[in-house]
């Protein structure tokens, strides 16, 4: 396995971010991942995305101010956009999410296996890009 | 009861109108008639309330006849004692007046009969069942995520949160047709807010004013929790700044007031369908339990959204 997959977590609820960190940690025996940073709102997420050029963004949809859909639109404009994995509590945005080329769509509470599968998809895509 | 007073007064308006169709005249006639009608209504209230147990024992038809006779007696009494004070006698004599009373009584009884059929226990029960309050799925899944996040770091708190969640869902899934003491609803709301606090932390501030809350007053179950859920969803979650929800519960004479305030951003119709649904649900349940004696009103003042529930104070099951 090459370089670790660089991830940022975006969610307005602290417990949700903490839980995602734990599950991410649990994935590390199968996949090399590195948490770069976390953000609690959309505006901060866009800043982080521009500064740190992550490979993957774990993105909550329903957030105050700029929501996840809006953040994903910003991501699409980048030259090398991060793979967007939406995380949401309730299945009401799936169609919109896939219009935005999200690589996956995870329902909370998120299982390790589901997160791992999504991250592996993102890693495969990165290899595809670098070729 | 209130419906009857309104109905009979409306009939008074009609009677006056029938007598003098021109505008200036009928208002005066209505006042004249009203002067007779009000004492009759009040006396009837007293008499029928007093005789209620005895009346309830009679077969339905006999009961109707007795009520009609009582009304006629009261009408005659009032007519004769007020005849000299108020010049109604120019308008109609005693026989006419009694006929009017009889007609009004029949209409009122007929209306009550229709209403009791429409609101027969079976139909009311079915309506109440259909109106079971529903919680937003998004709350359930976010709460479970929050509990999972505590499992490793703070197992004790995770346990408490799961217990709160269990209590909340027990009530949500229960048969909620019977009224419950206000205290039960209050405890449930506190548990619910505890869970929301877990997710939202600093962003959610709660201010209870319950010093004058009548704990024993009976209310429909889940009369307040869905409103708090709305307040969190529309008032707290859309902002990353802390916001405060204020709940004021008190009794004033025979009425219980529940007043809830939360910050409000006028963000158009985006979220309102869910809100309306919960409000209409509570409104309808209040009506099924208390008829027109209970109400739910909403009000937007500046950046605050306020819901006021008024319901009659009852400490025993009616």
Image (cartoon, coloured by chain):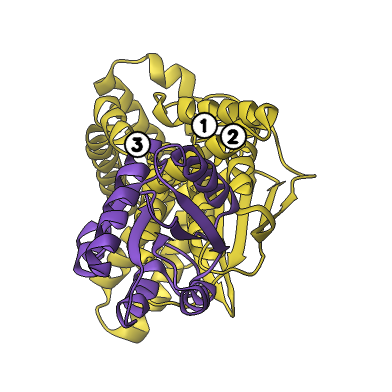
* Residue B154 higher or lower than B245, as above or below: above
* Residue B88 higher or lower than B79, as above or below: below
State the SS at label 3. helix
How many labels, in total?
3
Q: Badge 1 is on which residue?
A: B168
Q: Are marks 1 and 3 in contact (CB under 8 Å)?
A: no
Q: Do the residues at discs 2 and 3 belong to one chain?
A: no
Tell me, yes or no, if residue B188 can be seen here: yes
Closer-to-camera residue (A116/B287)? A116
Q: Chain of mark 3?
A: A
Residue drawn at x 56%, y 64% is: A40
Q: Are marks 1 and 2 in contact (CB under 8 Å)?
A: yes
CA separation in Å, label 1 and label 2: 6 Å
Where in the figure is residue A49, as x and y percent of width and height? 46, 74
Residue drawn at x 49%, y 63% is: B234
Q: Badge 3 is on which residue?
A: A113
In this rendering, position of residue B124 left or right of residue B51: left
Please tell me the colour of chain A.
purple
Q: Within 10 Å of the Cα at label 3, are there few (<14), some (14-19), or many (20+) other Cα atoms? A: few
Q: Badge 2 is on which residue?
A: B188
Residue drawn at x 59%, y 34% is: B188
Where in the figure is residue B268, as x and y percent of width and height? 39, 77
Closer-to-camera residue (B154/B236)? B154
Quarter-of-image position of residue B141: top left
Please tell me the colour of chain B.
yellow
Residue drawn at x 26%, y 55% is: A124
Where in the figure is residue B46, as x and y percent of width and height? 54, 37
Q: Chain of mark 2?
A: B
Tell me, yes or no, if residue B80 can be seen here: no
Of the 4 image quadrants, the one containing the C terminus of chain A is bottom left
State the SS at label 2. helix
């Amino acid at each position: 396995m090459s370089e670790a997959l660089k991830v940022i977590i975006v969610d307005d609820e602290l417990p949700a971010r903490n839980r995602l960190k734990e599950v991410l940690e649990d994935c590390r025996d199968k996949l090399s991942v590195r948490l770069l940073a976390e953000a609690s709102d959309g505006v901060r997420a866009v800043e982080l995305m521009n500064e740190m050029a992550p490979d993957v963004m774990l993105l909550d949809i329903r957030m105050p101010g700029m929501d996840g859909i809006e953040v994903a639109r910003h991501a699409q404009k980048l030259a090398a956009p991060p793979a967007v994995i939406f995380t949401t509590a309730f299945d009401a945005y799936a169609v919109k999410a896939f219009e935005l080329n999200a690589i996956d769509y995870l329902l909370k509470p998120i299982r390790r296996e589901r997160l791992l599968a999504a991250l592996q998809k993102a890693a495969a895509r990165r290899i595809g890009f670098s070729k | 009861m209130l419906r009857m007073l309104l109905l009979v007064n409306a009939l008074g308006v009609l009677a006056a109108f029938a007598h003098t169709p021109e505008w200036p005249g009928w208002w005066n006639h209505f006042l004249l008639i009203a002067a007779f009608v009000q004492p009759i209504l009040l006396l009837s209230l007293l008499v029928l309330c007093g005789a209620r147990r005895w009346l309830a024992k009679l077969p339905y038809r006999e009961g109707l006849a007795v009520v009609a006779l009582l009304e006629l007696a009261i009408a005659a009494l009032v007519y004769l004692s007020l005849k000299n004070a108020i010049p109604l006698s120019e308008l109609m004599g005693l026989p006419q007046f009694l006929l009017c009373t009889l007609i009004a009584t029949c209409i009122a009884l007929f209306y009550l009969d229709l209403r009791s059929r429409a609101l027969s226990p079976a139909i009311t029960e079915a309506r109440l069942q259909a109106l079971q309050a529903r919680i937003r799925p998004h709350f359930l899944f976010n709460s479970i995520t929050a509990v999972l996040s505590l499992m490793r770091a703070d197992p004790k708190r995770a346990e408490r949160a799961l217990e709160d969640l269990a209590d909340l869902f027990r009530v949500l899934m229960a048969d909620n047709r019977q009224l419950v003491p206000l205290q039960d609803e209050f405890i449930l709301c506190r548990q619910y807010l505890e869970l929301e606090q877990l997710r939202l932390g600093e962003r959610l501030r709660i201010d209870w004013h319950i010093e004058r809350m009548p704990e024993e007053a009976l209310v429909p179950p889940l009369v307040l929790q869905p409103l708090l859920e709305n307040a969190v969803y529309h008032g707290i979650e859309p902002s990353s700044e802390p916001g405060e929800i204020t709940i004021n519960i008190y009794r004033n004479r025979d009425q219980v007031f529940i007043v809830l305030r939360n910050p409000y951003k006028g963000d158009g119709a985006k979220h309102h369908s869910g809100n309306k649904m919960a409000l209409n649900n509570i409104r309808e349940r209040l009506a099924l339990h208390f008829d027109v004696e209970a109400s739910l009103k909403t009000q937007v003042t500046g950046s605050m959204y306020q819901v006021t529930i008024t319901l009659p104070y009852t400490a025993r099951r009616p």
